[in-house]
Image (tube, rainbow, N blue to C red):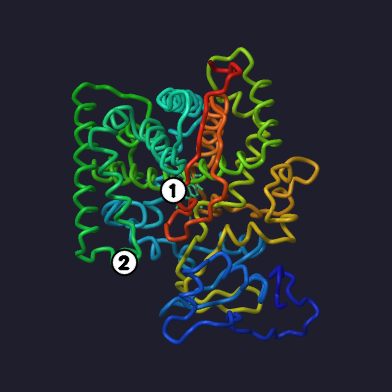
Amino acid sequence: MANRSHNPATLHPAEPSPRVEQGVPQLAGGWPLLGHLAEFQRDPVAMLSRGWREHGELFRFRLGPRDFVLFSGPEAHDFYFRAPEEQLNAKAVYRFTVPIFGRGVAYDASPEIMSEQLGFLFPALREAAMRRFALIMFDETRRFADALGEHGEIDLPHAMNELTVKIASRCLIGQEVRDQVDAGFAEAYHDLQNGINTLGFFLPRLPIAAHRTRDRARRKVAEIFGRIMAARRLSGASPDDFMQTLMDARYKDGRAPSDDEITGILLTVLFAGQHTSAVLATWTGLELLRAPSYLERVRDEMRDVYRGAEAVDISGLRQQTVLENAVRECERLHPPLILLIRKVLSPLRYGDNIVPAGAMAMVSPAVSHRLPHVFADPEQFFPDRFAPPASEDKQHHYALIGFGGGKHACMGKNFAYMQLKAIWTVLLDRFDFLPGTRFPRPNYGSWVTGPETPCRVRYRRRSEPGVFQ
Ligand code: HEM
């Protein structure tokens, strides 16, 4: 087994210099023209894990005409996340988002402008806002629970999608957009999401029906957001939300972002944060439901934290470490983004290996989270691995990378954790759930990896009075 978990800084310290530069080891198998495409499409995580077992922290493979290199393990992640944008470039990979987010926004802007645009939003994620978001998350989940009635059956991914669209539109955009979820916004957002497809990844402007629908939906969203911004300007209303934060923001050169840029930045955040949250909320529910003894500990913790309280709040959520460790374990086992990709713009030296320009460099949270030298018994759902004394995520920097790292690290991680905890606190307080007999497989056909659907779960209102009833 070659170069597994080598630290590039200490690679072969005893070897005489000059070092021998090697090509990156190539994964065995693959076909002419197609490369490893068929195996990758069948099960990318199994294929990439095979690569790690055979070659260790760095190997390459081919998907059609493109060369890919996978970096696995904490040291390799550290190197990957630290590489400068001129060498490992995100913009070149995420161009397919430009028709959705819009011109001059996020990956269509220079890295400096993109970081200014996302930086506008940090004030909207500060403590006071997070405190308010916790109450919104509680309120939306309680309304959702009320609508479920006494008992029934839901398709869990669908239900979590519906709920997180409401939470995200209210917290991340503004109340007016939440009010329009059923009056056109949800449909337009859905059409925009369907605009992300394999063809669009390579040819985002190809005139196909899905892209025409996508472009119509983008215009519709711009119209909805534009109307809301105009009404705010007219009335002088200035609510404390992301949209207003952007309306009040100024670039370093003093320019205000245009309405279209504001729409694009809001869509960037919504696309980054909503579906990913829905998927991780689904996996969290599914894992808890098949671990009844851990679920009991989550409920005991809820009773301890919220006895006598009327709503979940931020300080309560912060005390729910038993639930938090379950969410973290689901981030580990079921990261919604299984691959993070960058284009190599200039040759990259990692240890003795040179990754050539033009290749695609990836890290895979799904593969790296299953490395047995980082996480003991990695296939097991075992949330206590994150509690002392094991604290497995603290043993290595970048052991857990479900929210990325480096300059493109997720800005919404705390928001997402809080949301997932709020959702499952309310739902577990109100209902008992019974999942299907078979634990679902991941659906790798989608950009964000949720369980295969339908994924039905039965529920019944608990006879015991809950904390919030
Ligand atoms: C469970 C939920 C979430 C997961 C798993 C997740 C995961 C990630 C990951 C892996 C990245 C890095 C992508 C890369 O390196 O290519 C990322 C970036 C990002 N996330 Fe999240 N995210 C989640 C929720 C959120 C939320 C709620 C927000 C907004 C409040 C958000 C906003 C963003 C933004 C704006 C970026 C891009 C940062 C940049 O490129 O500079 N995410 N997220």
Q: Amino acid at mark 2?
A: Leu
Residue shown at 50%/71% (left/top)?
40
Q: Residue at x 19, y 31 (%)?
A: 230
* Marking on residue 199: 2
- Between 141 and 439, the one lying in front of the other is 439
- The single residue placed furthest to the top in the displayed view is 308
36 sits to left or right of 166: right
The image quadrant of residue 261 is top left
Q: Position of residue 115 (x, y in %)?
A: 42, 49
Circles 2, 1 touching at the beta carbon (< 8 Å): no
Which one is earlier in the sequence, the residue at label 2 or at label 1? 2
Label 2 secondary element: helix
Residue 132 visible (yes or no): no
* Residue ID at (62%, 72%): 50
* Image quarter of the N terminus: bottom right
Comparing marks 2 and 1, which lies closer to the viewer?
1
Q: On the image, numbered disc 1 is attached to which residue?
A: 454
Image coordinates for residue 34, horizontal then vertical, percent: 43, 81
Residue 359, compared with residue 446, is above or below; it is below
Task: Evaluate whether residue 102 shows in this view.
Answer: yes
Q: Nearer the viewer, residue 5 or 265?
A: 5
The verdict on label 1 being within 8 Å of ligand 1 is no
